[in-house]
Amino acid sequence: MKSLSIFLLNLLFLLLAFAPCSSQEKRIPFAPGEKLFFEVRWAFIPAAEGVLEILPMETLDGRKCYHFTMTSRTYEFVDVFYKVRDRIEGFTDEGMTRSVLYKKTQDGKRKRRISVNFDWEKLQARYSNFDERGEPVSILPGSFDPLSVFYAFRLFQLKEGEELRASVTDGRRCVVGKAKVIKREKIKVKNTLYDTFLVEPDLEQLGGVFEKSKDAKLQIWVTADGASIPVRVKSEVLVGSFVAELVSLTRPSP
């Protein structure tokens, strides 16, 4: 059940941590007020739920920032084995060019108060948990945290055969992830038909349960309407099959 918890904590974000390097003009297809609700199944059994939400803009150190949040919780029968009650927050500059602050609060089986502070003059990020502070790590220009990078991914139009790349940091290391847009297809999720792109990340940098699983596979379906909203995430790993699906969606009026 520990592997399930790793999946729940990272799947919706870290595994979507790929944004294409592109010179095309940025378009921002989201705004404060957007809310996505997901259900996670393990071997066809509902195991957890997650919510992605964009809160009102905030000002940090004089800079106007997007405020992204993700909350996740396991259902009661899973709590017996491994309870998850998490809240993750990511702050980026208004231009969506880099992260400003990252926070994670865990109150399940493990308790953590993680924060990652970014020093862009020195190109460094520093991880801390409660009163323990790690050594600064070097980061690449334009790096995003594991939550905000999901929204950076949504800035660009996708096309079949395109390879996506992004630099991501959790304050302890900085990696460049890769993913490929496999094809465009229509799928049905919760009785709703979606026109989507299927994206498959390179699992080399993901580690954890994926690193330990032979022939591990991860697939992500995002809407092909320019908003790139994830509607289904599926993985095949050593401990079984996991599927996260979009249950409900709230988006502000243009």
Image: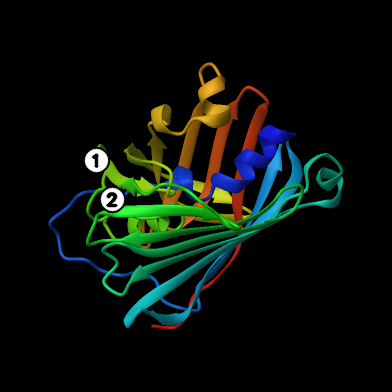
Say whether residue 104 is left or right of residue 138. Answer: right
Residue at the spot of label 1:
162
Q: Which mark is on residue 158?
A: 2
Check the image and report above or below for 150 versus 234.
Answer: below
Quadrant of the drawing holding the C terminus: bottom left
Check the image and report above or below for 176 versus 29.
Answer: above
Cα separation, mark 2 vs mark 1, equals 7 Å
Q: Can residue 226 be seen in this view?
A: no
Residue 212 place in picture, x, y as percent: 56, 21
Q: Which amino acid does label 1 sit on?
A: Glu
Q: Is residue 68 visible?
A: yes
Tell which of 40 and 2 is nearer to you.
2
Residue 178 place in picture, x, y as percent: 32, 37
Residue 144 place in picture, x, y as percent: 35, 55
Quadrant of the drawing holding the N terminus: top right
Say whether residue 120 is left or right of residue 133. Answer: left
Tell which of 250 and 166 is nearer to you.
166
Question: Is the Cβ of the residue at disc 2 closer than 8 Å to that at disc 1?
Answer: yes
Q: How crowded is mark 1: few (under 14 residues within 10 Å), some or many (20 or more)?
A: some
Q: Which amino acid does label 2 sit on?
A: Leu
Give the residue drawn at x 41%, y 47%.
135
Say whether residue 252 is left or right of residue 119. Answer: right
Check the image and report above or below for 24 versus 54.
Answer: above
**Helix, strand or loop at mark 1:** loop
